Amino acid sequence: MAKGEIYTIRTLDFEDTPSYHLRVEAVDYNAVDVQPSIVDVYIDVKDANDNAPVFSEKPVVCHVAEDAPVNSVVFTFTAKDHDSGDNGKVRYSIVDAAPESGHFAINPVNGELSSVRQLNFEHIHQFTLFVAATDQAKDVEKQKQTIVTATVVVDDANDHAPRFVSPSDVRIREDEPVEFVVIQILALDADSNEYGDIVYESVAPEITAKDGVFLLDVSTGILSIRRPLNYEHSSSYVLNITASDKGRPPKKASQLLTVHVDDVNDNTPHFSRDKYAVEVAENLAPAALLTVSATDADAGQNGQVEYSLLPASGEALFSIHKTSGQIRTTKQLDRESQATHVLTVYASDRGSPPRVSACTVLVTVGDANDHSPEFLGSCIALNIPENTEMPFVHTVAASDKDAGRNGQIRYSITAGNIGNTFNIDVNGQLSSRRIDRESVARYDLEITAQDHGKPPRSATCMLSIDITDLNDNAPVFMQSSYSAELSEATPVGTSVLAVTARDADTWQNAEVMYSLGEATDGLFSIDNGTGVITTTGRFDRERKGSFRLEVTATDGGHVPQSQSVPVLVTILDENDNAPVMTQFPFTAEVALSVQAGQELVQVQATDLDRGNNARLTYSLVDHIDMFVINKDTGYIMATRAFAPQIDDLLYITVKATDNGNPALSSIGIVELQVGPNQRRSRLTFQQTNYTAGVTENAQRGTQVTHVRAELLPGSRLIKYQFVSGNVDDVFSIHSTTGQISVAVPSALDREKIPAVHLVVEASAGDEHAYAHVWVMLQDENDNTPFFMHQHYYAFVYEGDPKGTYVARVAALDDDVDENAQLTYIIESGNDDRAFVIDSPQIGIVKTSIQLDREIQGFYTLIVRTIDSGFPRRSATCVLYIKVLDRNDNQPTFPPQGRVRLSEGSSIGMTVKVATANDVDLYPNLTYSFLLDGNPGNMFSLDRFTGRVSLAKSLDREIEDQYTVKIQASDSTNTAETTLTVLVTDENDNTPQFLEPFFECEVMELTPAGATILSIRADDNDIGENARITYELGPEHADSSFAISDEGDLITSKEIRFHQERTSVQLALTATDHGRPARFATAGVLVRIRDRNNNSPKFTENEYRATISEDTVPGKTVLQVTAKDADQSEENSHVVYYITGGNIGQVFQIVSGSGDVVLVKPVDRERLSTYRLSVLAQDRGHPPTNSTSIIVVKVSDSNDNAPTFNQTIYETTVQENVPKGTKVAQIQATDLDLDENAKIRHYITSGNIGDKFAINPIDGVISVNGDLDHEQQSEYRLIIKAVDGGKRPLSTITEVLVKIEDVNEFPPVFPYSSMEFFVPEDTKLGSRVFTAQAVDNDTGVFGDLHYSITNGADKSKFSIDSKTGEVTTAHRFDFERQNVFRFVLSVKDPGGQSAASEIVINLLSVDEYAPNFMEPEYKFEVPGNANVGTVIGQVQATDPDSGIHGVIRYQFSDPSEYFAISPTNGLITVKKSFEGAFARRKRDIRSGNVVLIVQATTGQHRSKISETVVQIKVDMACPGCSLAYLHATDGSATAGTSPLVIGLVCGFGVLIIILIVIGFVFLRLKGKRKKQATQRPFDLSFDTSNINESNMGSQMSIPPTIPNFNNYGIASTTHPLNLSQSEVSHQSQSSGRGSVEEGDMEDEEIRMINSTPPTQNQLSNTPPDSGLNNDDDTQSDVSVQNTQQYLANLGIDTSKLHQAGHNPDGSRKCNDDGNSSDDHSVDVHDLIYSQLNDVDGVGGSSAGRDSTNTFGPSDDSGHFTVPGSLSSIVHSEEELTGSYNWDYLLNWGPQFQPLAHVFADIARLKDETQNGKKVSVMGKGKHPVNSVKTTPPPLLTSVAPKTIAPVALSQRKSQYISAPPRSPISHDQSFTSTAMSPNFQPCLSPLATRSPSVSPMVKPRNGPEATSLQLASHIPSSYSPSSEPELHI
């Protein structure tokens, strides 16, 4: 905007935003130096009373307990007014209350509603209050008020106890059924809800007990019968009933309810037992047997009982007494004739009709013990395998013809049971414990069978059992372990010891074979038969001192068993190892002041032997006059103090001797340096350690290696000799040449000594040196493999799968590598190729087929092992493999036939012998029944023979056929067979009636021929034995009944019911046709019942009653009555039921009396009339009934409040409708009648400004005032409807009235034209900006529709029609088009529209990488070239435009000797090559240098290209050789000892450290003299321009800026918070190359840049910061004070008095907004003044930003940026170079060489040139309209060198203010774009392009960095300010 006017674009709302903080930026887009300025604008919005109070809840519903104390707080109203001050203060008041007022009061300040009178729920249970909230505007007429309707619900308190209204006495017949309702107990409670809900309960056990008589429904109070009543048990019940409400605590009431029970004849005489049993001896004379007893619980004649006996059942053998029930025998009984008698006894009462019951009496005739048990061949010889422990082995059986205990047999073993091994149970089953043949091999058992008679009778039999052997014992060694000791010199074949094992089994199970385990190392073998262990090899204790062998003894059983024993063989030591010195030589340094007895050095040696053979003694060989050695510890001590002249290197020979026999020794050397000179031997070996190799069969004289020592200086003869390690003189060494060769070939054996450690001594006079030579013996194939055992034994089961592991044969070879790589093959014995060596290199033998023992049971394999050496060597062993039998064949049974057996067969009789066969080896077959194979355990089975015998008596009637399933098992496989046993019949069963006594009923009027009962008797026999004939007994023959042959009882004539004859007793006999015949008798009781042929009749066809709907439950409405004409009790007893119409179960009828009782409240509105269907029913079978109707009418009471047909009403009305317009009509209805249903309507709240009115009668709501949608868009009216009852009831509802907007306002854009920016690489669909148009309409007409309607580039963008978001629809290319225009339109739904012209400026990005002209450059330079010599030039091009077409050159890695011009690619000599020779620089001395040159644009994320430059340094040029010789003069010291070199280096480092410490001390001392304060700084730079392509509306994108990296710095070693890719892509460009062709660097300036600083300059420069290799020292501090510096800038210091005022006379504002009238000199103003003069506009404030709040300012309000002019000229100390030391330690170079300033000034245009207004669109810059293009001054045309990047620090900021601003340039990022006309950075010290960021200061919050900002300079913790901003 040109004018900078700020205006509103929408209505302000103080409540939404009370103030605005706008940040306005003004930018003059100079072509070279964009000068922005930012000012903060604060706008405060004044409040108006435009908000009425708003209740947080509306409507309000709250609750209060009726027993709450007076002044209790009921509810707290809260209303908020968003206005401020008095306009926002709220006061509360009660406007109205219903139905009564005066019950509540409200606190006007805090809104607390409290009760002021005691409440009563029963009087009023709900109040409606109208509460007003009014603001306190000073103008009372402008006060706003809001009314809310509050419903206060009074919650009932439990202040009433229940009250019983039901009777306390009731009668009931005892025969009433279960669930019969006795009474409905009813109690009432005046309270409501849960306090009025009644719960009934009782503590009476008749109700609470699980078996209680009654059941009480806790909610309804219905008392019903739970269990049948019994008058005889209890004739009445008194129940304590409690009625409780659900209050807390509940209130209760109690009632004693008496239930009377009326008796009926409902009990039949009951015998004490259903069946009686008595036993009588067969020789007993007639006598009383027993007395039966029956009782009747009824009273009177109903309880008197008489007894009778069915004559046919006794056959005149028994009699019974009529009243006592005693039964007697009339004759003697005979058990052999009939063992049992069944008698039927009747018991009848004297009731009317009488009830009869019956019982049976079983008379058993006792037996005499006159028979002994008999065995029937079950005692036979048995064979049982040992280890048998089975539940049964064999079954013995005996029988006894007696009965009872006389016939019960028990079995016992009376002799021969050794060790109680066997046991026999009562059934004769013989079982055994675990049998061990080795303990007892045979048993002869005597079995006795004895009955239980008195006296008992018995019989015996002999049972022989032989025990067969099983391989159940493993061999047992005689000792638990064995041990032996052998000397390591023991010869092969020596017997070590013999092991012995025994096996307790017999025959082959006891044969023992011995074998050794694998851990023998091939040094032991064992005799398989005798167990003798012998040696098979030689021992070396030092390699292995003991052997833990495992000997296994295996028996020869079918399944072999084995046991192992450990054998420990200890190898005793032989003195076969000489001592070895731990080091050679031992060295020590001692002073001349050593005293006698002082320990100097310790000599140590080791000996691999042990004991005395390893105990060493030390002795001195020479120097015994000066030293003595401790023979045990090896410490050497001086014997006397050293003479002063002893200052030399001494060699002491030491001997270590062991205590073996013979003793072995070795020699060691001690090198002792005596005195302070610490002379070292000048004799040294070329290597300290030598390694050589020689084959173990090398010939004599074979050269091994060559050792060489050197003597410096001197040329004396050096002699060599072995001093250690050459045992047995195996090697020889030439004394003068040091050649080592083989001397004794026979002693070379790699298997004994794989490596020899030789110590060689070189001596030349008194000089000695030592070297270690390791001779590695190389293996030859000189050892034949040998197996660990010559014989291997293995077992494998037949049938195992292919690949089953069998055994592993293991061989060893003392050779190594290929010579020891063994391969195993089966040479012979592999029949049918049954085996294979699965792992030829391991020796694992596996099966290759499935083995079958029945085909071949044993294999003998010859296995050969062959090594891989040359020539090959081999050995063989024998592998014996026994195939173990696997139980892989099933036993088989021959076919079994059928066996017929009479059911009278004797126990023990053999039924069948079932034998199975098995082809496996030694099958151990056992026989057993299958799980269901022995039905009823009727048979026994011999465990090992398969003999089946009869174990129990047969009974064909129980089972006529048995399927016996037998299984034979060989412990793994089984076979099964089935034996069928058919049982033949005998007539041994008497017919049996299903019941001993039969009862039936016959209804009167049953016709003749009707079957009334089917009686069946069963006979378990078959055939004629089971055919039965039925007949009635003559004693009780009745002409009314007959029996058929099939046993059906039929009527012979029509049955008549007579009160005197209600039952008939009949006797029935059933006889079979067996020989002899058997018969049975039974009694039949026939009851004649009355037919229920009459129904009950009601006295009225319809009953009527009327009740009010507020009638209290418990009231009897009316009584109904019905009569039944039947005479019997059950047919004439009537009960009543309600069968229909009882909606909601409101009524209850008393079943016995017919009283209809109201049990629940009625509601007329729900149901006004009840039509109850009543049923009267008798108790007949089937019952008969009749029905009647009861009509109950309900009268009305006012119990319903009005109801609305909707909960919330919603309507819409336009804001411009006239007054009186109908808005809506609400309808309320009332379910009551008459006056109770008349309704009136009222608006209670929500009618703000009384804009609406309601007709109280019809509920029509109409407009009552002017409406304005923008002022109030909706109204929420609370409507109350009140009925006309005596106690009126009311209801409220809400009506939402929405004010519909009218299109009054058109949309408006804030600007007629707008300008935005977008990078050229923006993706399709990316956001550019969001259009903001304003429409003051707030309804539907405020919804705007955006579109792009015109413009040449409209197709390249798209817009969201709703949000106005403009996105890209085209891929941009800056080089083709960089400005786009189109017209943006907006339209509201009413058709009004607006438009704005949009200009989109494209921002350039780097698309193309630079392209070098040549892929590789080669140059040549003479070795004596001077500094600055031009070597060559590299050139690259870039297709990009603008700043992204600028090319900058740099080395990828800094070079010490070469430099490259960043602008034109010239490569020059940077440093003389002369020093390279002295420092032995390989890259220079080699003559070839390879450099990698990079070409970039210097921009952020710049693309990089690289090329290779090869530079040849010609050392053959004239004069080069002299330089070389001069550089190599010090080569004579090459032979200097490393120690000397190290000392020299150490002294040098120490001196440097001291210098550095002194330097730091001086600087710290200078720091204390400084007064200037270094201001901290962060990265929170200003952002101003609007570019919304990839960010929010408040984000700004700075133009792409150069990053200054490595300007003039040889190497960058400081850590940066950058990734490697970020650093490598941030190369710099001066803008040259693609902008101005042919622009060559000025030679003078090049010389200034290239010439090293003089000593004088170096002395005047500030000290190194310590951060980088500061090349900024090339820019000398050429000024000494502010005046001098400003004078150099062309500033007239005489005008200092004018610097304090702006040209326009305005006052500057500080950050706090205070103006400054200070007339003091301000250097910043001088600079601004000078810059204004350059611009030609003296009053421009583009370079100043005195109101910026982003950065810190000085005391005068100016902002400073470290590294910019504002900070440089801040103080005299800074201008003179007196910088703060801490600041320098934490800062990188900030100034470019002064030559760069000169170069930039030289390129300035003439200052007298008039500024022209041009449109600048620089690539990478923000486009601006009409800016001045006058650049700052330049001195020369030299492009600046690069400067090192400043390392970012994590140190926290020490200040709170925002970062300073540069007074020169206010760009949108932290670096400015001050550019020369050639797009070169100019005035680097004056601009903020130098990284003005402190590396030690962490930035505060600030604008968020975007994708186009230098992310590497902005830490991740940097976040934007939360302060609202507006960027313009």
Image (tube, rainbow, N blue to C red):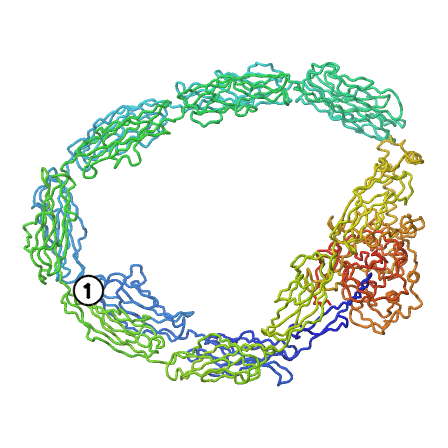
Q: Please state, as top left, top right, bottom left or bottom right, where the N terminus lies in the image.
A: bottom right
Query: For this rendering, which residue is in front, 1355 or 1200?
Result: 1355
Q: Is residue 104 above or below residue 247?
A: below
Classify residue 889 by image quadrant: top left
Q: How crowded is mark 1: few (under 14 residues within 10 Å), some or many (20 or more)?
A: some
Q: In this view, does 479 lie above or below 350?
A: above
Q: Residue at x 70, y 62 (%)?
A: 1920
**Residue identified by numbered label 1:** 1183
- SS at mark 1 in the image: loop
Classify residue 397 by image quadrant: top left
Counting the numbered discs, the total is 1
- Name the spot of residue 1809 as percent of width and height, x first: 89, 65
- Name the spot of residue 62 as percent of width and height, x first: 50, 74
Q: Is residue 1293 above or below residue 404?
A: below
Q: Please state, as top left, top right, bottom left or bottom right, where the C terminus lies in the image.
A: bottom right
Query: For this rendering, which residue is in front, 239 or 1424?
Result: 1424
Whether residue 780 appears in this view of the structure is yes
- Name the spot of residue 832 as percent of width and height, x first: 46, 20
**Residue placed furthest toward the front:** 1352
Does 1591 sit left or right of 554 as displayed?
Answer: right
Whether residue 281 appears in this view of the structure is no
Amino acid type at image mark 1: Pro
Does 233 sit left or right of 1027 as displayed?
Answer: right
- Name the spot of residue 442 as percent of width and height, x first: 32, 22
